[in-house]
Image: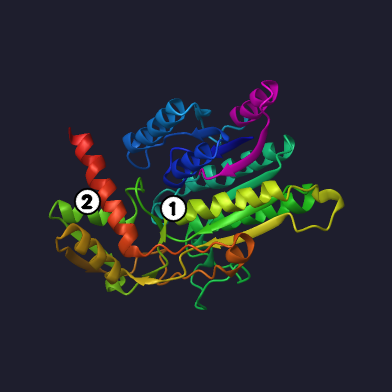
Amino acid sequence: MSILVTGAAGFIGYHLCKKLLEEKFKVIGLDNLNSYYDQDLKRSRVKELNDFSSKNGLIFNFIKGDIVNKSQIKKIFEDNLKSNTKIKMVINLAAQAGVRYSIENPSAYIQANIVGFSNIIEESKNYEVDHFIYASSSSVYGGNKKLPFNETDQVDNPVSLYAATKKSNELIAHTYSHLFKLPTVGLRFFTVYGPWGRPDMALFKFTNLILNDKSIQVFNYGKMVRDFTYIDDVIESIYLLIKKLIKNKKTYKNTQYQKPYKIFNIGNSKPTNLEDYIKAIELNLNKKAKIVYEDMQPGDVKATYANTDSLVNEINFKPNTSINVGIKKFISWYISYYKKSSN
């Protein structure tokens, strides 16, 4: 079975491609390798995937391209159809990430997260993929005060453009499911962290700064709570959803089997105070952080907390890696990776 993964050189994309290859899927990875953060890190992820697939006789085809380029997306589907490797599933992880950057550079989000998303879902419909899975975000909950966040909660008040684009993705997906019976699954990720993570995320930044004896900025004076979710739990959740979708493949046009549109929270359901998170980093680095407390940042929220009952009911799996275990694994990877880089 051929699966197209967009954003394949990204943090979650890399880990998902690796998992799919391990499970013997044919994987087409697409990424534009943009300069939002360290391109060498992205290239290293792609190299790892190429090396892993070559060593184990697996099929991984990486394409440097952009979902904003509609003709290029169409060509990928067409080329695979001609070579008798029709793409059966699309997992769209490509997006312009980051809440704060969306305030500085809104056009990047409109292009990648709305234009690009529209292109990839349109071609998925045109080439009749069996399933379309896409990354949403916990940011769609905005400033909701009711905790934990439930998929049925009202999410019409985003507090950042990034959140607005992710909510737009969900609306577009709903429309395609309704009009064209395209089965779509949206995944609301809650603060994903772990090895090969993004340099713009708190764990990566704090680790780097602490190791280099530099101060870390802690916003809202540390009074923030996050549902930190370890990458392996995220990937296992996605993989189990994929397995269930394949097992339960049905034609939606003539059946009441299930709704072709679904949304799932993917979180750890154990919200952690940011200051406790920093203490866990300090413990694993055996080094104290120099903290500079700052006001709340525009577009940020004070707390996130996922209700994952729907996910557990669907796949009988609940993300559960503790921050102590997850942070330890990240720091081990970080030190190893940058030690190799410096050599």
Instruction: Using the image, tell me which numbered label, if any, was put on residue 208.
Output: 2
Q: Give the quadrant of the C terminus.
A: top left
Amino acid at the residue labelled 2 = Asn
Q: At numbered mark 2, what does the secondary structure look like: helix, strand or loop? A: helix
Residue located at (51% from left, 53% from top)? 236
Residue 76 magenta-highlighted? yes
| Position in image of residue 83 (x %, y %) | 66, 21
Asked if residue 72 lies in the magenta stretch, the reply is: yes
Q: Residue furthest right?
A: 254
Q: Which mark is residue 232?
A: 1
Which is nearer the eye, 74 or 260? 260
Depth check: give the residue in front, 131 or 295. 131
Q: Nearer the viewer, residue 296 or 147?
A: 147
* Mark 2 surroundings: few (<14), some (14-19) or many (≥20) residues within 10 A: some
Q: Say what amino acid the circle numbered 1 marks.
A: Asp
**In this rendering, is residue 302 above or below 167?**
below
Q: Residue at x 54, y 47 (%)?
A: 113
